[in-house]
Image (cartoon, rainbow, N blue to C red):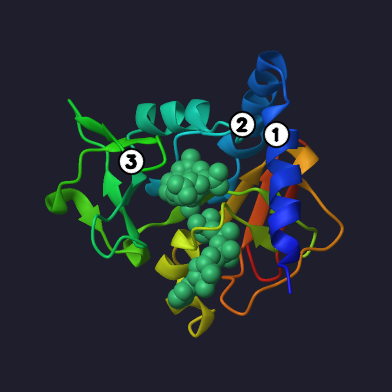
Amino acid sequence: MSDPRILLRRQLRQARRALTPCEQRTASEQLLRQLVHHPLFRRSRHIAFYLANDGEIDPHLLMQRARELGKHCYLPVLRRWPANQMHFQLLRPGQRWTTNRYGIREPRPDPRWQVSPWRLDLVLMPLVGFDAQGNRLGMGGGYYDRLFAYRRTRAHWPAPRLLGLAHHCQKVDQLPVAPWDVPLDGIVSDQQIILLQGTA
Ligand SMILES: Nc1nc2c(c(=O)[nH]1)N(C=O)[C@@H](CNc1ccc(C(=O)N[C@@H](CCC(=O)O)C(=O)O)cc1)CN2
Ligand SMILES: Nc1ncnc2c1ncn2[C@@H]1O[C@H](COP(=O)(O)OP(=O)(O)OP(=O)(O)O)[C@@H](O)[C@H]1O
């Protein structure tokens, strides 16, 4: 039986890649506007971002603001072994960079600056698709799901808050949910903020 996620992923990735540079810039500015004064951002001192790839909504303006505000910013770094795992690494002055197996830039791995996910206050997650119930479709590597698998049994741990970031065109009526999917606390698109029950 074929996985309905595969076709959906292809369509939604095409849609976000089709956005013009001008639409991308506007979306990035809208994202900044939505989040910069939001308590979820203002209260957070340790925040994980991502470097936009494949037409993803670009959080770099927000990351720039976070750095100006003296917040600690982290990016995902893929583990060499086991190859299906990732963690977050603090961005440092004079940061050195490398390129991961998908061609995405990431900080050069340095265990001294890698943190356990529960040390973060807020994680901004890239996504391919979302629905109003807060379900997320990712790139299919399962990296975020594996890292936050502990949340499925400890749903009430306050930290970190998990927010998916997306272009509005990535919204669908209802996503198929997999048993390993980690529920998000909210989704922020260039047009709306959806906060799930219990998220303040
Ligand atoms: N910007 C960004 N960084 C991220 C993620 C992400 O989704 N976006 N990730 C979120 O998990 C992790 C990387 N996961 C990824 C998983 C698949 C592909 C990808 O392009 N897959 C190709 C197949 C490539 C291959 O098999 O070699 C494809 O589907 O076309 C990219 C990133 C960590 N960093
Ligand atoms: N907690 C977990 N433990 C083991 N395998 C997992 C776990 N979570 C996800 N996986 C595996 O990862 C694969 C990809 O999952 P899925 O398609 O949901 O990824 P995704 O959420 O789209 O990707 P990503 O999180 O990287 O953006 C699945 O085949 C699944 O078996």
Mark 3: amino acid? Asn
Circles 2, 1 touching at the beta carbon (< 8 Å)? yes
- Dot 3, crowdedness within 10 Å: few (<14), some or many (≥20)? some
Residue farthest along the left direction in this orientation: 112
Q: Nearer the viewer, residue 8 or 153?
A: 8
CA gap, disc 3 and disc 2: 17 Å
Comes first in the chain, label 3 or label 2: 2
Mark 1: amino acid? Arg
Q: Nearer the viewer, residue 138 or 156?
A: 138
Mark 2: amino acid? Gly
Residue farthest along the bottom direction in this orientation: 153
Q: Is residue 145 visible?
A: yes
Label 3 vs label 2, nearer the camera: 3
- The answer to whether residue 111 is above or below residue 180 is above
Residue farthest along the top direction in this orientation: 22
Secondary structure beneath disc 3?
A: loop
Answer yes or no: disc 3 within 8 Å of ligand 1.
yes
Q: Which residue is mark 1?
A: 16
CA gap, disc 3 and disc 1: 22 Å
Secondary structure beneath disc 2?
A: loop
Direction from residue 163 to residue 97 in the image, left or right:
left
CA gap, disc 2 and disc 1: 5 Å
Q: Which residue is mark 2?
A: 55
- Dot 2, crowdedness within 10 Å: few (<14), some or many (≥20)? some
Residue drawn at (27%, 56%), measured in percent from left and top?
79
Which labelled disc corresponds to residue 100? 3
Percent across and percent down for residue 23 are 72, 20
Query: Picture quarter containing residue 18?
Result: top right
Which labelled disc corresponds to residue 135? none
Number of marks drawn: 3
Comes first in the chain, label 3 or label 1: 1
